[in-house]
Image (cartoon, helix red, strand yellow):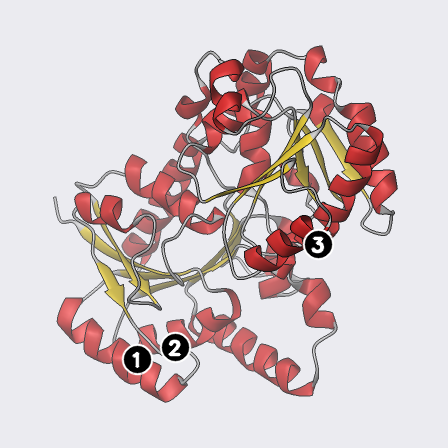
Amino acid sequence: MIVKKILHVVGCMDRGGIETWLMHILRNSDRQRFQMDFLVETTKQSAYDDEILAFGSKIIPCLHPSKPLLYASNFKQLYRQYGPYDIVHSHIHNYSGYVLRLAEQVGVPIRIAHSHNDTSAIDAKAGLIRRLYLGLTKYSIKKYATAGLACSSAAAAALYGSDWKKDSRWQLLYYGIDLCVFNFESTPTTIRSQFGIPTDTLVIGHVGRFDPQKNHDFLIDIAVEVIKRQPKAYFLLIGDGFLRSTMEKKVQQLGLSQQIIFAGLRSDVPRLMKNVMDVFLLPSLHEGLPLVLLEAQAAGLTCVFSDTITEEANIVKILMQKVSLSQSADWWAEIILSTSHAKAQITSKESLDLVKQSPFNIYTSVQKLQNLYTKSLSNH
């Protein structure tokens, strides 16, 4: 059997939603049929690099995306070195237009754009230069993509336009998560003690990159209001990013460093969700379809999340509470405290079973993606 070579284009392979999903795909794909390599924008070591290399995949740094001519030269030189590839699958939103143009120039037959985010609200406020850039990249995607995927309807509209359904190239591919990692009995006492959290207190958790999109500033305002009402409550924030030190400083100034814990990047998110958290909080300004919200439901957590998040992520409805971002932090705090008991209405096994039956199971996701690759190549 001839192995088909796929080049995934990403920023880097750190622990983010897109990257975690790609790792689920890599671990569960048929490696006798598909060889997956990763073109990244950095030479720095990333969280998933060692595992990628252990699977026999390559990590190929292609630097200077902000300098298009230099990036093009790097891309073509690297393609001569590591190619040819049957498929280039780009995950870098608007810039995918330029990547797929370069892929077409070097002769890649199948070129896939992938929208992982709903950026429509931000794009609507763009200035003139940004609007010109968006117009050019979207034109390039339409011209050079042989297929386009999106993790939700909102993410599809953001990259391919509101009439995306009229073009047969554009289609939805829901994220799949590996649900086996949630299939264990929880032991909260042991794990909570590692963070100095008492076993009998309410813990609100969050997983996300420290980036403006995730709205950590407002999240900490909510935490202040929750702790006012429930002084023994704790917050566990998992993730890293350039805003982390700013947020840590804010928490320090509020005198809440004991109760708002910054746990950094973690490889054991399912374990922490099941053993430490009672409520999952996600006040994001925008999302495509947040993987962490699917994971939180698989862990059986009550979820309080912003109204910017697509309805498609709402699987275990009894656990889900959508709140408008126009509401105040104290309103969010009231919702968190009033819904923290919903967890008792459904067992973690029942919520896990509902996620398993949804389109968000990794096996469904892998199968659909492999079918798309195979069909695209056979039609070419």
The mark found on residue 101 in the picture is: 2
Q: Say which residue appears at 16% left-offset and 67% top-offset.
A: 82
Vertical side of 69 occupied by 36: above or below: above
Q: Mark 3 or 2, which is nearer the eye?
A: 3
Residue 315's image quarter? top right
The mark found on residue 105 in the picture is: 1
Earlier sequence position, callout 3 versus callout 1: 1
Percent x, y of residue 350: 58, 13
Most foreground residue, 173 or 362: 362
Residue 71's image quarter? bottom left
Give how far apart the Cα atoms at labels 3 and 2 are.
Answer: 38 Å
* Badge 2 element: helix
Q: Say which residue appears at 55% left-offset and 74% top-offset.
A: 138
Give how far apart the Cα atoms at labels 3 and 1 are.
Answer: 44 Å
In screen coordinates, is 23 left or right of 123? left
Task: Look at label 2 and name its amino acid.
Answer: Arg
Residue 305's image quarter? top right
In screen coordinates, is 211 left or right of 366? right
Q: Say which residue appears at 72% left-offset and 12% top-offset.
A: 345
Query: Circles 2 and 1: CB distance less than 8 Å?
Result: yes
Q: Circle 3 is placed at which residue position? A: 217
Q: Is residue 284 visible?
A: no
